[in-house]
Structure formats: structure tokens, C-alpha cells
């Protein structure tokens, strides 16, 4: 039923008001959600007045008028290869989930065996979760972490020998430590398996020299630019030359059709920027700030899962330390203007929606100009409120302090250190 014009005018007003509300909220809270990063205005205000969509692979479009599109996509792909030491890059996936789907489609047949990290130990939904496409179409088994919360590479080696997977998947959404790609490649080689790495979270740290590069050890790598690279949404698949045709065909026509030029341009600009000197400094400050969290939270020896972090993120076991489920800890901190997300932990006893811990990261605050002193204040405020979650006076004072601290991030388009 078509309604009167006034109905749609009112809807438009409501839409704008909702966006403005969210924008104000974002500027008046401190975002510690690990994947969160503010996107520079330069990736939004791009010099494309008529940004089209295109279909087909680079240099193989099924229609005319794509010369400029090809050049832009080629620049994005070549820059991605340079930054990650890859032979070939496909920058067309709309996100990392379809990028992972394309990699599976390129290397596997339905029902093939895949070995991946347990969801509660840090793995991702697309790494074989039973309710995800990956778990429905492929035969996944899982490796995990030892009692110290760290990957047990000997145990992975043994698991691979027993299970004999066609592919081993590494990379995680909540594992805060360095991953030994060379060691995993040895396990894969012993059983004749492909090695795939989903590196959405540490992508920027890899470029900044703060995390090991996956090549030449991995056969395929997926990543996104919207976490530690401050970029737009979208997925990238990196691979060796021998697999490029498999990967490209798995992306198109395998899992998707047309792609927007605007997004490809934004990705190219982000990749170029991350190769500049300022970006190495930025990733260094990300690590410095997470180390501040590590120092403050070390007051409780078992609070940090794995005992700390090598990356931009960490996981706190709030249930066993403070008696707070992840859901309750998340709500407590949101009440004082600090955003985190509930997180399952190794040996999880709660339902995923409730969880036993929270995950937090340092990318957003670093991009918004928080230095080590500011980060220490945030960490101490987190700790005090987890220790005393039912203290209204503390909560009121903390909320005021955090609101005052957000003034650092309210300056329009402040990208500290970016040239």
C-alpha cells in the first residue's frame, strides 16, 4: 500500500534523528570494542561523482566503460600484495565472511574435513560454527588452547595427524597473541592440507610490523580493512600465484556478482595510506595503549585470558574474577560510557549470549588521540567499576570523568599522527 507523502517525510525525519542520536552517542562514549575503529573522512568524501558498479573479474568485465574501474581495482590489488608480501589479491569480496566462503569454495568440496580454532577459544563463526554456512557444508573439527590460554602447537600437530583435514584454518576474533604461521604450515604440510589464515583483526598490525606476516607460510589469507587499518568495510583475499585462478573464480561467479566502485576506491586509498610512515607509528601506539591495559589489569593474576596481549585486543574473565557475567560486565561499563562486548572464554560455562568475559581493544581510542595517560585512566575506571558494580556514586563520578575524557575524540576528524 502506498501512503501519503507526509508519511514518508516523517519517516525520513525519524531516520535522520536516529542517525544524529547515534552520532552523538558515539562521540560521548569511549569505544573499547575490539573491532571498532573510526573511519577517516577522506575515505567517505572521495573524488567520484558518478560511482558505478561493475561485474566480473579485473580486466574481464562483461560490458564496456570499465577502464577507470579496472585501473582503480588494479591499484588496490597491487598495493595489498606489496603490503602483505602476497602474489595475488582479490579485493572484490563484500566482507570477510564471503571472502572466507570463497576460499572454502576454491579449495574444498562439500563435506571435506577442516580443522579450525574453537569458537570459545577465539575462533570465528565462519570457522566451522554449527549454525554458520561453514559448519553446515564442511566437516569441521577443532583445536584449542592449553591451560595457559595459549595455542598448543604440538596438540594441533597431533590433532591434524589424527583428523587428516584438507584445510587448516588459523586466525581468530578473540585470541590476543601472536600466531606462529610457520609452525602451523608444518602441521599442514605433514597431512597435505592447505593453510588458510583469517587475519581481519591483526591486519593493520601486520602492515605496521607488529605481527608476523602470513606469507610464504599460508596458502590463502582473508582480511578486512575496517578494524586495525581504519578503513572501509570490505574483504580481501590474498594468495599464492598457483591459486589465483581458483580464488578469482570462487569470488566471481562463485559467491557474488557486482561490486561498487566507491568501495574499491576507498580500499585502495586506505591501503596506500597504511604503507606510509605515520601508520607504523599509529600501530606502535595501539600496542603501547594495550600494554597500559595489561599493566593495570595485572592487579588480578587471572583476569586477562592468556595473561595479557600481543595485539590490539584482550579478553577479561569477569565471571571468575568478579562474579560478573560478560553480559553484566558489558552493561556495567556501558552505564559509565565505556563500550565493550561480552565474550566467551576458554572452558566457557555460560551461553554465548551471556558469556563469562568481555573483549576490549585499543584501536578506537588510539585513533582518537588517547595517549598512555588517558588510557591508564580508562583502564583504572574499568577496573574500579568491575570491582564495585553496584556503587551508584562511583558510577556517577566515573561517567562524568569519561564524558570529560571524550572531548579528546570530539574534534572533527582528528587522525593523530596521520600525514
Image (spheres, rainbow, N blue to C red):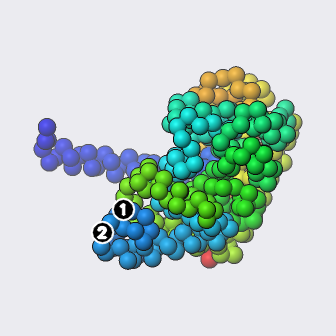
**Is residue 46 rendered to the left or right of residue 139?**
left
Q: Residues within 10 Å of mark 2 (few under 14, many from 20)?
A: few
Which of the marked residues, 2 or 1, is nearer the chain's N terminus?
1
Dots 2, 1 in contact, CB < 8 A = yes
Q: Is residue 358 visible?
A: no
Task: Determine whether the residue tagged by mark 2 lies in a helix, strand or loop.
Answer: loop
Q: Residue at x 75, y 65 (%)?
A: 209
**Is residue 228 rendered to the left or right of residue 52?**
right
Q: Residue at x 85, y 39 (%)?
A: 154
Q: Residue 22, image x and y in percent?
A: 45, 48
Which of these two is toward me, 162 or 410? 162
Q: Residues within 10 Å of mark 1 (few under 14, many from 20)?
A: some
Mark on residue 244? none
Residue 346 appears in which quarter of the rendering?
A: top right
Q: Which residue is mark 1?
A: 55
Q: Residue 188, image x and y in percent?
A: 74, 46
Q: Is residue 264 visible?
A: yes
Amino acid at each position: 500500500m502506498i501512503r501519503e507523502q507526509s508519511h514518508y517525510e516523517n519517516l525520513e525525519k525519524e531516520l535522520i534523528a536516529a542517525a544524529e542520536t547515534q552520532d552523538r552517542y558515539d562521540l560521548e562514549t569511549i569505544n573499547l570494542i575490539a573491532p571498532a575503529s573510526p573511519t577517516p573522512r577522506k575515505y567517505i568524501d572521495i573524488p567520484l561523482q558518478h560511482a558505478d558498479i561493475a561485474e566480473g573479474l579485473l580486466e574481464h568485465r562483461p560490458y564496456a566503460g570499465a577502464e577507470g574501474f579496472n585501473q582503480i581495482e588494479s591499484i588496490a590489488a597491487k598495493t595489498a600484495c606489496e603490503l602483505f608480501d602476497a602474489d595475488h589479491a582479490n579485493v572484490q569480496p563484500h566482507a570477510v565472511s564471503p571472502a572466507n566462503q570463497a576460499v572454502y569454495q576454491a579449495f574444498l568440496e562439500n563435506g571435506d574435513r577442516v580443522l579450525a580454532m574453537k569458537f570459545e577459544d577465539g575462533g570465528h563463526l565462519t570457522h566451522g560454527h554449527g549454525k554458520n554456512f561453514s559448519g553446515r557444508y564442511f566437516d569441521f573439527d577443532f583445536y584449542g588452547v592449553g591451560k595457559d590460554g595459549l595455542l598448543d602447537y604440538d596438540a594441533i600437530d597431533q590433532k591434524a595427524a589424527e583428523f587428516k583435514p584438507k584445510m587448516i584454518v588459523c586466525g581468530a576474533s578473540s585470541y590476543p597473541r601472536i600466531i606462529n604461521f610457520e609452525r602451523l604450515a608444518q602441521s599442514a604440510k605433514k597431512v597435505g592440507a592447505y593453510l588458510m589464515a583469517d587475519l581481519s583483526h591483526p591486519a593493520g598490525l601486520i602492515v605496521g610490523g607488529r605481527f608476523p606476516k602470513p606469507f610464504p607460510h599460508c596458502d590463502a589469507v582473508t582480511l578486512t580493512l575496517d578494524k586495525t587499518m581504519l578503513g572501509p568495510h570490505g574483504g580481501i583475499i590474498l594468495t599464492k600465484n598457483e591459486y589465483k585462478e581458483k580464488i578469482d573464480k570462487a569470488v566471481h561467479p562463485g559467491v557474488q556478482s557486482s561490486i561498487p566502485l566507491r568501495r574499491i576506491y576507498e580500499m585502495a586509498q586506505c591501503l596506500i595510506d597504511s604503507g606510509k610512515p605515520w601508520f607504523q607509528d599509529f600501530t606502535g601506539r595501539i600496542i603501547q595503549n594495550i600494554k597500559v591495559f595489561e599493566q593495570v589489569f595485572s592487579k588480578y593474576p587471572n583476569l586477562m585470558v592468556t595473561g595479557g596481549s600481543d595485539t590490539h585486543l584482550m579478553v577479561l574473565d569477569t565471571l571468575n574474577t568478579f562474579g560478573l557475567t560478560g553480559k553484566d560486565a558489558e552493561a556495567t561499563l556501558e552505564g559509565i560510557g565505556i563500550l565493550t562486548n561480552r565474550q566467551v572464554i576458554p572452558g566457557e560455562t555460560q551461553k554465548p549470549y551471556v558469556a563469562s568475559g568481555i573483549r576490549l581493544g585499543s584501536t578506537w581510542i588510539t585513533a582518537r588521540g588517547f595517549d598512555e595517560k588517558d588510557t591508564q585512566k580508562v583502564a583504572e575506571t574499568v577496573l574500579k567499576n568491575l570491582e564495585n558494580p553496584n556503587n551508584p556514586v562511583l558510577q556517577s563520578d566515573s561517567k562524568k570523568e569519561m564524558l570529560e575524557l571524550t572531548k579528546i575524540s570530539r574534534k572533527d576528524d582528528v587522525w593523530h599522527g596521520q600525514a
